[in-house]
Image (cartoon, rainbow, N blue to C red):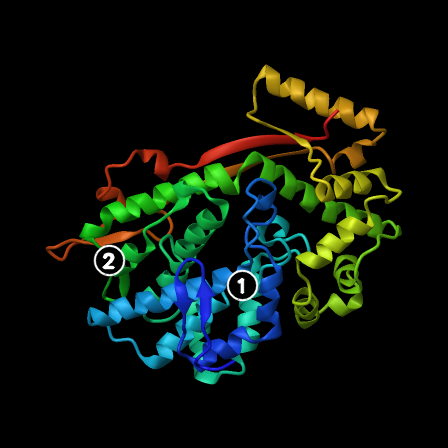
């Protein structure tokens, strides 16, 4: 790749990073793999357009980072070329640890959160780039002496969230998720190396947080997407269960090596090498090959996902109707001839939470005209609904 390489992004138009290091990182095989990992898991079972890859999101977030740094520099914030490069490396790699189907299979393949894997990949990449790589690590981990760089890539108002909300709302067609990323970036300020928002940007931030809440309620935790992704997760768990019991399951060699805990995966380097070779295609291959597996549970899960014949889901909990549904789920599993252990792979109960904003984390703070800095909670007139977790209890079970 070269310095003149352009990306035609559907959200931002023509994107040019003007930095050879960024293009060099993009060109690495483990980064190109993000082209084959969907950003939104199985959300396209509900929103047909939601098939965009993590590759697009990584480029988009990097583009917004550069725009944010340009805004701050125009307001007199001193930012060196080395800091720009390191920050770009950190945001470009911020999702490199995602595996097939992104959050849907979080922790299922290697038992680690994607941020742990991202850090491992970043450490390995940093070895090649000396001081730039070391600084990228500091920024990513939040240990750099100028914390506003970390806030730009990992906070409650970062370029990651600005891009994925904009991108996901675009591809799903859900207008409620549209955020004013351009105005928010123009409202960025820094005082004492802390990332702040100008007072007049309040309503843009309120809209951003409401949009985030609505996207979780309407898209990310849509009940059909939730069913599909839980079925996918239980498919992998069932495969591991069968392999541990000596049964054969057809799949690619790399995926099987990872799921069987072969000695090659004993080291972190071995895990990373295998993990970086996997994408959505490997999992689809497993699903298609095992639709007619002798194990009725695996066959049910694979067929349901391939043909979009999904399990039933009920939302609620704690009342008589919920107890009736739990009894029905057990009855259906019994009629399928499943043991209690087998039934645990097709009957899934749990709880998800929507947290739009929490000042217990990294609060969004505003720079007043008189120079005072105040938190979002003291600025907004919005309902406290945005400040409280919204629990959603669910029960998933086979249809009759």
Decide if residue 204 is on the left or right side of residue 24: left
Q: Secondary structure at mark 1?
A: helix
Quarter occupied by residue 304: top right
Few, some or many residues within 10 Å of mark 1 (<14, 14–19, 20+): many
Where's residue 252, x and y in %?
Answer: 79, 61
For disc 2, the neighbor class at 10 Å (few under 14, some 14 to 19, many from 20) is many
Q: Is residue 348 left or right of residue 147?
A: right
State the residue in front, 258 or 176: 176
Q: Are marks 1 and 2 in contact (CB under 8 Å)?
A: no
Name the spot of residue 11 as percent of width and height, x first: 41, 57
In this image, 180 relative to 139: left or right?
A: left
In the rendered image, the residue lying farthest to the left is: 370
Q: Is residue 92 above or below residue 396?
A: below
In this orientation, does residue 141 appear? no
Residue at position x 71%, y 36% from top?
309
- Left or right: where does residue 178 sit relative to residue 192? right
In the rendered view of the protein, which quadrant contains the C terminus? top right
Seen from this angle, which residue lies furthest top?
320
Disc on res. 279: none
Cα distance, mark 1 to mark 2? 27 Å
User: Which residue sits at x=39%, y=55%?
Assistant: 162
Residue beneath disc 1: 55
Secondary structure under the numbered disc 2 in the rendered image = loop
Return the residue at label 2: 187
Residue 178 screen position, x and y as percent: 38, 47
Asked if residue 8 is positioned above or below residue 246 in the image, the reply reads below
Which quadrant of the figure has residue 318?
A: top right
């Amino acid at each position: 790749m070269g310095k003149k390489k352009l990306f035609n992004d559907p959200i931002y138009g023509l994107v040019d990073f003007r930095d050879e290091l960024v293009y060099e990182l993009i060109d690495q095989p483990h980064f190109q793999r993000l082209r084959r990992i969907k950003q939104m898991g199985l959300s396209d079972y509900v929103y047909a357009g939601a098939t965009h890859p993590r590759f697009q999101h990584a480029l988009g977030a990097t583009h917004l980072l550069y725009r944010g740094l340009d805004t701050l520099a125009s307001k007199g914030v001193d930012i060196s070329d080395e800091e720009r490069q390191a920050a770009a490396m950190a945001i470009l790699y911020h999702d490199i640890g995602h595996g097939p189907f992104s959050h849907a299979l979080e922790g299922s393949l290697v038992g680690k959160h994607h941020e742990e894997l991202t850090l491992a990949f970043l450490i390995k990449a940093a070895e090649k780039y000396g001081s730039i790589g070391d600084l990228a690590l500091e920024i990513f981990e939040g240990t750099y002496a100028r914390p506003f760089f970390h806030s730009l890539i990992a906070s409650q108002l970062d370029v990651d969230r600005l891009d994925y909300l904009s991108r996901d709302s675009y591809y799903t067609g859900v207008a409620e998720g549209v955020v004013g990323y351009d105005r928010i970036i123009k409202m960025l300020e820094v005082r004492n190396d802390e990332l702040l928002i100008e007072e007049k940007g309040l309503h843009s931030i309120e809209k951003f947080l409401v949009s985030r809440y609505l996207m979780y309620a309407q898209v990310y935790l849509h009940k059909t997407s939730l069913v599909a992704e839980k079925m996918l997760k239980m498919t992998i768990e069932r495969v591991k269960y069968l392999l541990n019991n000596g049964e054969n399951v057809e799949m690619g060699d790399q995926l099987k090596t990872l799921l069987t805990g072969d000695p090659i995966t004993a080291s972190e380097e071995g895990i990373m090498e295998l993990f970086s070779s996997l994408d959505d295609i490997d999992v689809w291959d497993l699903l298609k090959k095992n639709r007619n597996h002798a194990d009725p549970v695996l066959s049910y899960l694979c067929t349901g996902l391939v043909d979009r014949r999904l399990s039933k889901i009920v939302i609620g909990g704690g009342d008589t109707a919920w107890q009736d549904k739990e009894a029905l789920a057990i009855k259906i599993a019994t009629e399928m001839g499943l043991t209690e252990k087998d039934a645990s792979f097709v009957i899934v109960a749990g709880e998800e939470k929507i947290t739009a904003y929490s000042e217990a984390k990294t609060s969004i703070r505003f720079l007043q005209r008189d120079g005072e800095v105040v938190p979002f909670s003291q600025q907004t007139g919005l309902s406290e609904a945005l400040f409280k977790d919204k629990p959603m209890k669910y029960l998933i079970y086979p249809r009759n």
